[in-house]
Image (spheres, coloured by chain):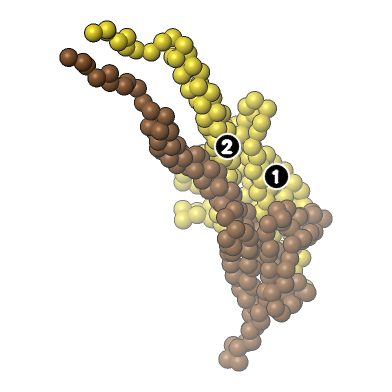
Amino acid sequence: MKQRQQGVTLIEVAIGSFIISLLMASVMNLFGAGMRGSTKGMAHLTNMEAAAVLMSQIEYDLLRAVKLLDPAPGASDKVARWEILTDSGNGTIIYNLLDNGIEREFDGTSDDNKHIYCKGLDVKLAFSHVTFAASPGAGNKAGMWVEISVATPKKGGSSEEFKMKRLILCRNIAAL
Amino acid sequence: MSNPVRKHGFSFVEILFAVIFLGFLIAPIFSLLTQSSSGTVQNRNDILAQQHATNLLAYAYALPYDHAFLTPGPARVIKELNVTADGKAMNLGMDEEMFTRSFEVDEHKPADWPHAYKILTVRVKWKQANESARQIKVAGLVSQ
C-alpha cells in the first residue's frame, strides 16, 4: 500500500494566506472608517457635554445674581463677575478663561471654592451684559448674552467644535 | 486489504457557510459604530432645540408686556431673530436648517382677577436621522 502524503503544499498556503489578507484588508478598512467616525462622535459628545454643563452652571449662577459687576452694561468680555445670594449670605462668582478651560470661582462670606470646567479643551467664551428697556415706569431688565465654543485640541489637523449661545435674563435683579 | 482513501480538508460549500456565519457575527459591531454616531447627533439636536426654545422665551420675558412681539395670536414661525439691546446685537435665529420654531401667545383676562396674563408657548420641531419627527415644547407666563 502506497502511503498518501498528507498536508498542504507551500503554494496552497501562499494562495490561502493571500486570499485571507485580501479579505482582512477590506474588513480592516471598513472597521477603521467606523472607528474614525466613532472617535469623531465621541469628541463631539465630549464637547457638547462640557458646553452644556458649563452653560447650565452659568445659567444657575445668573438666575441667582443680584448685581452684575463685570462686564459693564453694554460691554463684552471673556471674564465675568457678579454677586449672588446664597443661603449663607452674599458671595461673588468669577468666571475666568484659562488656557485649558474655564475657571469658576466662588468667593463667599463663609466658604470659597474653585472649579475648572471644560478641562483640557479649547474654549472660547464671551459674556455680554445687556439691558432691555421696559415699558415706561417699569424699569429696565438686565441679562447676559453668553457665547461658548468648545473644541477638542487639534490632532492630525481635524478638530471638532460645538457652539452654544444663550440669552439669560437675571430674574433676581430688581428693575434698574 | 484496501484502505479507502479519506478525503481531507473542507469543501467549498463548508467554507462558504463559515464565511457567511462569520459575517453575521461581525455585522452587529458595525451597526454599533454607526448607532453611536447617530446617538451623538440626536443628543446634539436635543441640546440645540432646547437652546433655540429657551432663547426665544428669554427674549419674550425681557420685553414689556404690551410689546408688539407679544401680540396674542395663533402660532407663528420664527426662524430668524436679530435683536438689539443696549447697542448689543444678538442673533437669536437658528443656524441649522432642520429646525422649525413656532411661537404662540395666548392672553387671559380672568374676570375675578385684576391682572391680565399671557401664556407663551415655543415649539421646536425637527426630523431625526431615521426620519421620525421630534418636537419639544417650552411654555412660560408673563403678567402685567
Q: Taking A54 as reference, is B124 above or below it? A: below
Question: Residue B59 location, x and y as percent?
Answer: 70, 63
Distance (Cα) linking label 2 and label 1: 31 Å
Q: Amino acid at mark 1?
A: Ala
Question: Between residues A138 and B77, which one lies in front from this camera angle?
Answer: B77
Residue at 50% over, 22% down: A19
Residue at 68% over, 47% down: A147
Q: Amino acid at mark 2?
A: Gly
Q: Taking B88 as reference, is A34 above or below it? A: above
Q: Do callouts 2 and 1 mark residues in contact (Cβ within 8 Å)?
A: no
Q: Are marks 2 and 1 on the same chain?
A: yes
Residue at 59% over, 62% down: B133
Residue A4 picture quarter: top left
**Element under label 2?**
helix
The chain painted brown is: B
Q: Chain of mark 2?
A: A
N-terminal label among 2 and 1: 2
| Quadrant placement of the C terminus of chain B | bottom right
Q: Taking B104 as reference, is A118 above or below it? A: above
Disc on res. A126: 1
The nearer-to-camera label among 2 and 1 is 2
The chain painted yellow is: A
Q: Is residue B90 visible?
A: yes
**Element under label 1?**
strand
Which residue bears the numbered disc 2? Answer: A37
Circle 2 residues within 10 Å: few <14, some 14–19, many ≥20: some
Question: Residue A168 location, x and y as percent?
Answer: 65, 57
Please give left or right for residue A164 compared with residue B32 in the image: right
